[in-house]
């Protein structure tokens, strides 16, 4: 399922935080949003997963206006992992993941055997099946993140919107989760369907390695877009992130990888010494 974001602007408390965003994610593609702190990534994603309404512009899934759909219909198509998500009540892990099935059920709490199997499968895919009976609030940050990813996958969406999905995960889990998402989540290989993923990522090397295309946000606007190799240039990284970057190729995958240094600060001028 393709995502088309067109001329999207988002306002919070009367302040426009995101301006005129046009972004395309083709069906089955993994598209990354990168940008410095405060550049508008979360605000844009919040509008895409419908926590905020657009001030202008549209978000369409295969041509249908997402903000015009009813909540249940939207939730069957799109699942989200917000940056700070979770539950205040101490549900068990199994109960948290089961919430992902609600959009597919008639009436609340009528889980079928199929629903239960989908939840177990999603937990197993993120390596968290052993946590099923644990209380969610007692989990570590990384364990919580894995469970919330399982909930999103159990929702069986066609589009996944992730805000910093690798937060709290150790390096092995970061690679595991992004590979899993990229490979299509729980999507049964036999269905031939791949998830379309829009994800904010701080780690530019993970973004370069896992995303088909990147959009770079700065000051609430898109300042560059394209394949990671074309986008993550030393000039852009200096201008947007304020760092000096060296590009190397991953010896196995060939993906662009970056080594960072602080930008050299200009030597003080003689006049400043006097
Ligand atoms: N509810 C709000 N009220 C006022 N300003 C807000 C609100 N939410 C976000 N902002 C501001 O909007 C800008 C964009 O914030 P946003 O969280 O979207 O950035 P981000 O790129 O996701 O940042 P980070 O990388 O730090 O998570 C920031 O300047 C932030 O302070």
Image (cartoon, rainbow, N blue to C red):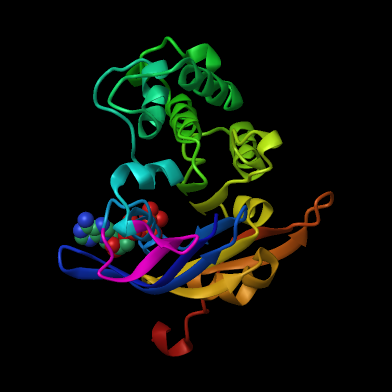
Compared to residue 250, the image places residue 87 above or below, namely above
Which is nearer the eye, 8 or 107?
107
Q: In this view, does 98 lie to the left or right of 253?
A: left
Residue 91: quarter of image: top left
Q: In which quarter of the image is ligand 1?
A: bottom left
Q: What stretch is highlighted in magenta?
A: 53-66
Which is nearer the eye, 202 or 241?
202
Residue 101, given in percent of the width and then of the height, sits at 41, 28
Residue 253, given in percent of the width and then of the height, sits at 80, 51
Residue 73, given in percent of the width and then of the height, sits at 36, 45
Quadrant assignment for the C terminus:
bottom left
Q: Is residue 162 left or right of residue 109?
A: right
Q: Is residue 257 left or right of residue 151?
A: right
Compared to residue 99, the image places residue 179 above or below, namely below
Quadrant assignment for the N terminus:
bottom right
**Hey, which residue is sitting farthest left in the picture?**
13
Q: Which residue is drawn at 15% across and 68% down?
A: 14
Compared to residue 218, the image places residue 106 above or below, namely above
**Hey, which residue is sitting farthest front in the picture?**
106
Q: Which residue is drawn at 66% across and 67% down?
A: 227
Which is nearer the eye, 54 or 43?
54
Q: Is residue 61 on the magenta stretch?
A: yes
């Amino acid at each position: 399922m393709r995502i088309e974001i067109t001329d999207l602007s988002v306002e919070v408390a009367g302040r426009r935080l995101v301006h005129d965003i046009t972004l395309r994610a083709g069906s089955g593609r993994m598209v990354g949003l990168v940008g410095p702190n405060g550049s508008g990534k979360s605000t844009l994603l919040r509008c895409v997963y419908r926590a905020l309404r657009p001030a202008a512009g549209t978000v369409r899934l295969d041509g249908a206006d997402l903000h015009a759909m009813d909540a249940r219909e939207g939730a069957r198509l799109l699942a989200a992992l917000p940056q700070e998500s979770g539950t205040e009540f101490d549900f068990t892990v199994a109960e948290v993941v089961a919430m992902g099935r609600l959009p597919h059920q008639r009436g609340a709490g009528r889980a079928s055997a199929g629903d239960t199997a989908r939840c177990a499968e999603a937990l197993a895919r993120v390596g968290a099946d052993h946590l099923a009976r644990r209380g969610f609030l007692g989990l570590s940050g990384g364990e919580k993140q894995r469970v919330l990813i399982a909930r999103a996958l159990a929702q069986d969406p066609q589009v996944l919107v992730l805000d910093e999905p690798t937060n709290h995960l150790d390096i092995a889990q970061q690679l595991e989760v992004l590979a899993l998402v990229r490979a299509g989540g729980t999507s049964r290989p036999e269905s031939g369907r791949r998830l379309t993923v829009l994800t904010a990522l701080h780690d530019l090397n993970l973004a370069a390695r896992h995303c088909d295309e990147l959009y770079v946000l700065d000051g609430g606007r898109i300042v560059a877009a394209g394949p990671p190799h074309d986008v993550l240039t030393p000039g852009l990284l200096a201008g947007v992130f304020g760092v000096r970057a060296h590009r190397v190729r991953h010896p196995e995958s060939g993906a662009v990888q970056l080594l960072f240094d602080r930008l050299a600060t200009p030597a003080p001028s003689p006049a400043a010494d006097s």
